[in-house]
Amino acid sequence: MADVGSYTVPLAQLQRLIMQPIRIGGLTIILLDALSAEHDQDWKHPPHRHPWYEFNYVSQGGLFTTSAGAEFRIEAGQAYLIPPGVVHSHRHLPGESDDGFCLRWQIVQEEGGAANITADEAEFIQCLSLPRPYALQPDMTEGLRGLRPEMSLLALQAAFAAWQTGLFDAWRAAPSIPREPSQDQGALVVRQTLLFLQAYYANEVRVEDIATALHVSYRNLARLFRRQTGLTVVEKLNDIRVQQAKKLLLETDMPMKQIALAVGLRNEFYFSRLFKQIAMTTPSEFRSHRGEARASKR
């Protein structure tokens, strides 16, 4: 995939896989999007994050990406992976542009969660969730180059699953970003805030109440949390609520209203809107993957 035209056909085949569950052992991969990505001269994207894996291939031009605080360069023919929840940003050099494609997907564990996956599958998720300041080399797209219109859906799913395992091998061999534990007061406040959110996400949580409990000002808490995590306290709270809702959707038959209440949201419609905003699918669609996984076992 050395130029723009060389990935047009494979990209069209990948679009056939969107929202089609792809199983690797006890894991289910849901491809959310497969699209061309062209950025004009001097493009830059401020720090942001998303709840899916994002693989970006650069066919022409180049750019700098900062992932979890470490900046690295991506040249034409290279690619990079951004794991879910990792704060990252992009920028061009003056007069620079780039072209390529972007794949987005999520990995859903089998019903029963971590208890029902193998050690290898757990390593697969853990490894791909680590941010690495690393440009993947051109051979990383080899598994996608051969996708053709005459391939069946099953053949496309098998090819994409094989490409995922190849990506895992490449990511596992890459140097990770060192994360030295910080002992300063700001880091302590952030850790305590995270513990507070994990413990009380099912209740009505106000940032002001957390600040009072930790004996810091609202402004100071908000500033420290955003600086160290890249998120607001409310964004992190919503992440936790959606993750807990995913478990209930997969592991129980609770109706949506009860799930909303169980994760601290008093309005079923707001719950559905928030879930789709973060998970890129509705609660009902997410739960349907459980039924598809069960049917595939019969």
Image (cartoon, helix red, strand yellow):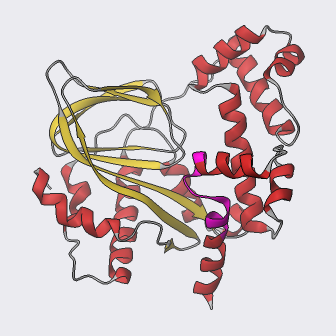
The residue lying at 49 percent from left, 64 percent from top is 30
Quadrant in which residue 195 is drawn? top right
Residue 175 at x, y percent in the picture: 39, 38
**Is residue 200 shown above or below 152?**
above
Residue 111 at x, y percent in the picture: 70, 70
Residue 244 at x, y percent in the picture: 75, 51
Main SS class of the magenta portion in the image: helix
Q: Is residue 49 left or right of residue 122?
A: left
The residue lying at 54 percent from left, 45 percent from top is 51
Q: Which residues are magenta?
A: 277-287
The residue lying at 64 percent from left, 13 percent from top is 223
Quadrant in which residue 229 is drawn? top right
User: Is 10 in front, or is 282?
Assistant: 282
Q: Is residue 157 left or right of residue 91?
A: right
Quadrant placement of the N terminus: bottom left
Residue 183 in view here: no
Residue 54 at x, y percent in the picture: 41, 47
Residue 197 in view here: yes
Quadrant placement of the C terminus: bottom right
Q: Is residue 162 left or right of residue 269?
A: left
Quadrant in which residue 119 is drawn? bottom right
